[in-house]
Image (tube, grey):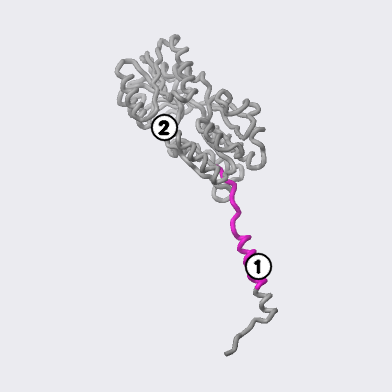
Amino acid sequence: MRINHLSRREFITLLGGAATWSLVARAQQPAKLPTIGFLGADASAFSPWTAAFVARMRELGWIEGRTISIEYRWSEGRPERYTEIAAEFVRLKVDVIVTVGSAVPTVKQATSVIPIVFALATDPVGSGLVASLAHPGGNITGFHNYEPALGAKWMGILKEIAPAVRRAAFVHVPEITANVAFMRVGEASSAALGMTVSGAGVRNAADIEHVVTEFAKEANGGLIVTPSPLTATRRAEIIELAARLRLPAIYSFRFYTADGGLISYGIDQNELVREAASYVDRILRGTNPAELPVQLPTKYQLVINMKTANALGLNVPNSMQLLADEVIE
């Protein structure tokens, strides 16, 4: 029986070829893309914001799926999810976390290393998120979205669009200090408007149904729906209740009005999220988040849903329609 043996030269050639193919295969393996962890309350409510974020990142040279990866996670109105999602982002070793202000304390506990950019936070200094607006320090920076003075502004707008309103209920989550601050400022302005204020504290969907229905048992009432993950994810129920109980209501974000709410006044969230994308770009290119100041909003939107106004029998003043950034027919 004859056995074929490789010559020394053939063996070396074969070995060298295997090594070359190994190097080629390794070189062809895609490098890990920079990854952003994006944490929000609700995929549907946040869809305009995520679109604005992705569009701005593209303008800055970051293309999702090609030069950058974005991991989206949603709390679905359950704050307890923040801990779970923050831990997941740490395990994934994301390069930056973008989130709403209410989630930042939890995310902050999960990491002191990964940069965190908040796009929608109220009172970041008072709540201890940052040391100061000019010098946030640590690994956190972002964009301040609301001032407590809006509580009075919402009262005035509600009175203007629905002059018969004498009672206003602030639909709020008691554990969110900013919600309470809005209500306190609203209370301080109520006498001048000939109105009274009551708190409609809610913690779940059942609370919303109960407190709003109870409030509607007396005449001349209106709602002021403050911003929170709960009110955002339960907006369909709130809008339906307001329509069924014939309660004029003002909301903090445009998406409520787009979904059938009467009127909204608040920051231009898309613009704020675009600015957050600019901060993410700078961080990915090497800027320390501690060197990026927390910025205040500069642009607010007034949006009116005329179909809802007509259903409630409200005659919206022409002056208000002319001032509105958008009138939904």
Pick the residue in front: 233 or 248.
233
Asked whether the residues under the numbered discs 1 and 2 touch, taking CB atoms below 8 Å apart as contact, a structural biologist would say no
Marking on residue 55: none
Asked whether 286 falls inside the magenta stretch, the response is: no
On the image, the x and y values in percent for residue 128 come to 57, 26
Q: Is residue 298 toward the left or the right of residue 199 in the image?
A: right
SS for dot 2:
helix
The answer to which image quadrant residue 203 occupies is: top left
287 or 53: nearer the viewer: 287
Position in image of residue 148 (x %, y %): 51, 20
Q: Quadrant of residue 226?
A: top left
Q: Measure how far apart labels 1 and 2 are at the Cα level.
A: 59 Å
Residue visible at 30% across and 26% down? 244
Q: Residue at x 47, y 12 (%)?
A: 188
Instruction: Say which element carries label 1.
Output: helix
Q: Give the answer, above or below, for where 136 lies relative to 6.
A: above
* Start-end of magenta stretch: 15-36
Q: Which residue is mark 1?
A: 20
Camera sees residue 264: no
Q: Residue at x 61, y 85 (%)?
A: 4
- x, y percentage for residue 302? 47, 25
Mainly helix, strand or loop, the magenta region? Answer: helix
**Type of amino acid under label 1:** Thr
Does residue 57 appear in this view? yes
Q: Which residue is mark 2?
A: 258
Amino acid type, callout 2: Ala
Relative to 229, 278 lies left or right:
right
